[in-house]
Amino acid sequence: MIQRIQTLWLLLAAIFNGLLFFIPVYKYNIPNQVYSPWNTVQVNNYIPLFILAALITVLPLVSIFFFKNRKRQISMVWISILSMVSFFALLLIRVSNLKNGSAATGNFQYTFPGIFVVLLALICCVLALRNIRKDEQLIKSMDRLR
């Protein structure tokens, strides 16, 4: 199980997604105050983001254990990729709602590591998917030789 490269890619994706619980995703400030510090927001502050972050952290770990059933592993990785894209969409919706609906319109910025770790995890999942397909092709070619 660990000797396959896709296991390492999926483990890295889970680690990158796990970092979402410790680093801020975006920050904002309210400019009309005397002292206006940047307030950082993590995924723990918004329940749907928290649930989706937990899902995108657990899915790559679960798909590691489907190493004997490659078709199911491929489907789990696809679900993980779609969940990461939906995390991005939900995050964009959340920040745009805060920008438009907030009484105190301030400056909203995405933090660099918060968005970057999900992008790295998405790349790791795509690389894992590529290596699972290579593994599947190798098995098919070995069956053809028999």
Image (cartoon, grey):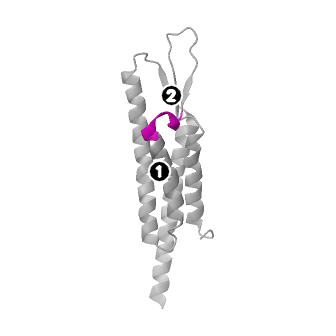
Q: Secondary structure at mark 1?
A: helix
Label 2: how many residues lie within 10 Å, few (<14), some (14-19) or many (20+)? Answer: some
Q: Position of residue 143 (x, y in %)?
A: 46, 86
Q: Is residue 129 magenta?
A: no
Indicate which disc residue 109 carries.
2
**Horizontal side, residue 78 vs residue 58: left or right:** left
Give the residue furthest to the top.
34
The residue stretch that appears in magenta: 42-49
Which circle's residue, 1 or 2, is located before the other in the chain? Answer: 1
Q: Position of residue 27 (x, y in %)?
A: 53, 27
Indicate which disc residue 63 carries.
none
The residue indicated by pointer 1 is: 55
Whether 15 is drawn above or below 138: the answer is: above
**Residue occupying image coordinates x 46% and y 60%:** 77
Q: Secondary structure at mark 2?
A: strand
Splitting the image into 4 quarters, where does residue 100 fall? top left
Q: Position of residue 80 (x, y in %)?
A: 45, 55
Give the residue furthest to the bottom.
146
**Horizontal side, residue 116 vs residue 82: left or right:** right
Between marks 1 and 2, how big is the CA–CA gap? 24 Å
**Residue occupying image coordinates x 53% and y 34%:** 42
